[in-house]
């Protein structure tokens, strides 16, 4: 096999698109909403996430907030999200960073009940199935889930803006213990303000599931009010994974 000369290697590396940098940190840009075009067209690389039994969908659109483009979500007795497929090894890129704002919280929201299972804002992380990293009972449940629902993630973490539950609380989803909800913001004190968030997803996964995380295979944003029937407006800024170095 012919080897590239040092000059050729330099040229190839120079032309390769970078992952991105923040100082000495390397980042994977998941949601570059700030570069989206204003309007109802979806941000590049993102697609709708809808559910068969929920006819009313949250409306997402790119809007200007000051000089920056962000995604605005408006939900009125509705539920849907936007999802972006991405592969991330949390051993290399453990930190998730984003910013968001809600104009109001969901008064009837309650993370522990089906009737209150609505969130003004949510960042949803899904994980790839790796049969070598799960026990037998989890494999069985996963296979049954695939028969019922098709291609599903093996696990999920939801970072949520809740109404009444304390920040830092980790709760099983009311539908499955393979989906964990982590309360990042709670209550109305910060409503109307842009909040910068940063989470170590690698550590959150180990704490929530008690095992090493598989690869991330998707990130979604979601604002939903289908269970409570309320109306809420939320905004999402850029989303990145970073190396943490």
Image (cartoon, rainbow, N blue to C red):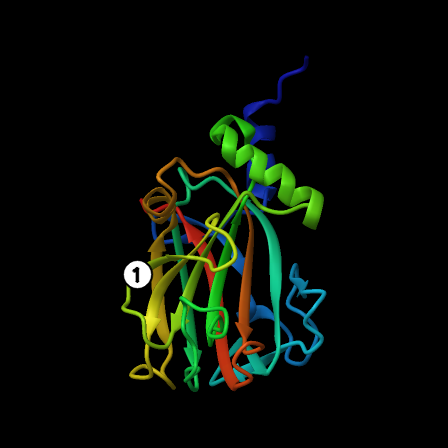
Mark 1 crowd level (few <14, some 14–19, many ≥20, 10 Å Cα): few
Residue 244 at x, y percent in the picture: 33, 47
- Where in the figure is residue 227, as x and y percent of width and height? 55, 76
- Location of mark 1 (residue): 169
Q: Quadrant of residue 104?
A: bottom left
Q: Residue at x 63, y 37 (%)?
A: 143
- How many labels were placed on the picture? 1
Residue 109 x, y percent position in the rendering: 43, 77
Residue 7 vs 61, above or below: the answer is above
Residue found at x 48% / y 47%:
178
Corner quadrant of residue 165: bottom left
Q: Is residue 118 visible?
A: yes
- Vertical arrangement, residue 84 with respect to residue 7, above or below: below
Which residue is nearer to you in this view: 156 or 42? 156
Report the residue that reaches farthest toward the top.
Answer: 1
Q: Position of residue 3 (x, y in %)?
A: 62, 17
Front residue (pair 27, 47): 47
SS at mark 1 in the image: loop
Q: Is residue 233 left or right of residue 25?
A: right
Residue 5's place in the image compared with 146, above or below, is above
Q: On the rendered image, what quadrant is the C terminus found in?
A: top left
Q: Is residue 7 left or right of residue 105?
A: right
Image point (35%, 65%), residue name: 183
Residue 150 in sight from this viewpoint: no
Q: Which quarter of the figure is the N terminus placed in? A: top right
52 sits to left or right of 110: right
């Amino acid at each position: 096999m012919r080897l590239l000369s040092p000059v050729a290697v330099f040229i190839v590396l120079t032309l390769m698109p970078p992952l991105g940098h923040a100082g000495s940190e390397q980042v994977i840009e998941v949601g570059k909403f700030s570069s989206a075009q204003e309007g109802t067209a979806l941000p590049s690389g993102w697609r709708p996430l809808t559910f068969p039994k929920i006819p009313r969908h949250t409306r997402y659109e790119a809007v200007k907030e000051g000089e920056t483009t962000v995604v605005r979500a408006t939900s009125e007795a509705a539920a849907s999200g936007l999802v972006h497929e991405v592969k991330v090894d949390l051993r290399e890129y453990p930190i998730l960073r984003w910013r968001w704002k809600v104009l109001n919280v969901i008064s009837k929201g309650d993370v522990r009940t089906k009737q209150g299972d609505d969130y003004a804002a949510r960042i949803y992380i899904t994980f790839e199935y790796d049969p070598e990293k799960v026990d037998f009972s989890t494999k069985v449940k996963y296979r049954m889930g695939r028969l019922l629902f098709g291609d599903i993630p093996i696990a999920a973490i939801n970072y949520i803006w809740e109404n009444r539950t304390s920040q830092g609380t980790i709760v099983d989803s009311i539908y499955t213990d393979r989906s964990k909800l982590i309360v990042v913001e709670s209550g109305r004190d910060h409503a109307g303000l842009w909040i910068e968030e940063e989470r170590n997803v690698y550590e959150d996964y180990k704490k929530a599931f008690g095992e090493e995380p598989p690869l991330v295979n998707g990130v979604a944003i979601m604002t939903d009010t289908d269970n409570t029937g309320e109306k809420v407006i939320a905004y999402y800024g850029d989303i990145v994974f970073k190396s943490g170095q």
